[in-house]
Image (cartoon, rainbow, N blue to C red):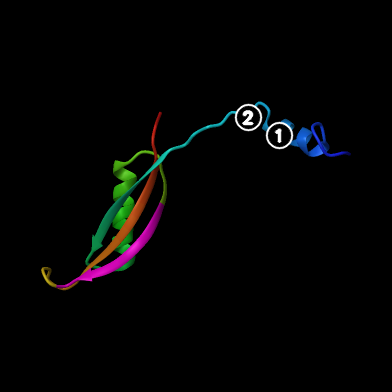
Amino acid sequence: MADGPGRREDVILSLSCANVDRIAMVFKKITLIGTSSESFDAAADDAIDRADETLDNVKWIEVDDLGVEIASVEGREYQAEVTVAFELEG
């Protein structure tokens, strides 16, 4: 088919874009720090459980950083910093 309006690629593109409702999803990200005296896994689970209990529409969680506090606690306090992404309503 010749170049110009009406060529096959234009028809396919216009058909694939026709009547497509665009649904906008907006997410918010927050940072939480979970703690545990047992392990990094338990600290991450603490943050994930808290996000699940207190936030609606949680879509994903990323573990960003791990640390251990030893100065102001007896023993060790494992910490997991996580980013929580949830979808905003409306």
Name which residue lies at 19% across and 72% down.
Answer: 76
Q: Looking at the image, is 10 positioned above or below residue 74?
A: above
CB within 8 Å, label 1 to label 2: yes
Mark-to-mark CA distance, 1 and 2: 8 Å
Name which residue lies at 26% across and 64% down.
Answer: 79
Q: In the image, what residue type sits under mark 2?
A: Val
Name which residue lies at 10% across and 68% down.
Answer: 72
Image coordinates for residue 50, horizontal then vertical, percent:
29, 49
Image coordinates for residue 4, horizontal then vertical, percent:
81, 35
Image coordinates for residue 8, horizontal then vertical, percent:
82, 37
| Magenta highlight range | 61-70
Identify the residue position indicated by label 1 in the image: 16
Q: Quadrant of residue 2?
A: top right
Q: Residue furthest top?
A: 19
Q: In the image, what residue type sits under mark 1?
A: Ser
Q: Looking at the image, is 9 positioned above or below residue 79?
A: above
**Regarding mark 2 in the picture, which secondary structure is present there?**
loop
Neighbour tally class for label 2: few under 14, some 14-19, many 20 plus, Cα within 10 Å: few
Q: Residue furthest right?
A: 1
**Regarding mark 1 in the picture, which secondary structure is present there?**
helix
Identify the residue position indicated by label 2 in the image: 20
Q: Quadrant of residue 63?
A: bottom left
